[in-house]
Amino acid sequence: MIGAALGIMVGVAWGCEPVGAVPESLQVAWISPVRDTVGGKDYIEVIRVRDLRAWVRANSSDPVRVLQATGMLDRDPSERQTSREYKITVFDVQSAWLCRPVIDAVAGEDISNIAACEIPEQRAADRHHRAGFTGCGYTLDTNASNRGLDVYRVSWEEAAAWGFCVMPLERFLEGA
């Protein structure tokens, strides 16, 4: 909760930076604790696989550092947070299925070829938000205190339409 509030304050204090456009179809990843599940109508927060791989190659494949870059762990994570096992679920999606969680945008507004999320999907308060939520369409890297990766929301039902692949986060990072 504190991480989400910090992310919102950072987004408001610094103002939002532009976000990148995406192609018509792309791969996205949902990173979550192993035990997290969602219903078909629930929205999940995802990042582009290509962006995640590029970040890992340029910075670090350490799982804790990656989780901080994606805004999922606080700067000084507790032992409880870092000892949890994480999984990554990769989906092939259409960009039309995605929305951007941008707080100051009008729902449906085009932001670099992706619509702004409807009000319920814009919030950071649901159980699937990241600690580094900024409300700007990208994460806060909680370790470096700077912009992280572009983030999107998609319903599980749409994301899973073409299938998905689930693996331990560490295994994904080994091949990134």
Image (cartoon, grey):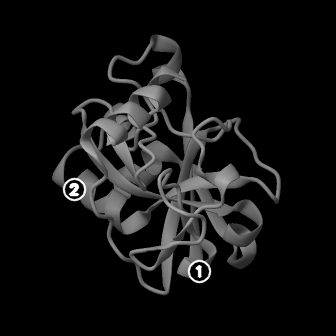
Where is residue 27 shown, x and y percent of the image? 49, 72
Query: Element type at marker 1?
Result: helix
Residue plotted at (44% across, 53% down): 172
> Quarter-wise, where is residue 86 in the image?
top right
Q: CA distance from mark 1 to mark 2?
A: 28 Å
Q: Residues within 10 Å of mark 2 (few under 14, many from 20)?
A: few
Circle 1 is placed at which residue position? 96
Where is residue 101 shown, x and y percent of the image? 52, 55
Residue plotted at (31% across, 52% down): 16
| Marks 1 and 2, the one that precedes in the sequence | 2
Residue 149, visible in the rendered structure: yes
Horizontal placement of 24 versus 22: left or right?
Answer: right
Q: Which mark is residue 52?
A: none
Q: Between residues 59 and 19, which one lies in front from this camera angle?
A: 19
The vertical placement of 58 against 170, above or below, is: below
Circle 2 is placed at which residue position? 57
Query: Element type at marker 2?
Result: helix
Q: For the N terminus, which image quadrant?
A: top right
Callout 1 amino acid? Ala
Where is residue 45 shown, x and y percent of the image? 57, 52
Q: Between residues 144 and 134, which one lies in front from this camera angle?
A: 134
Where is residue 96 shown, x and y percent of the image? 59, 80
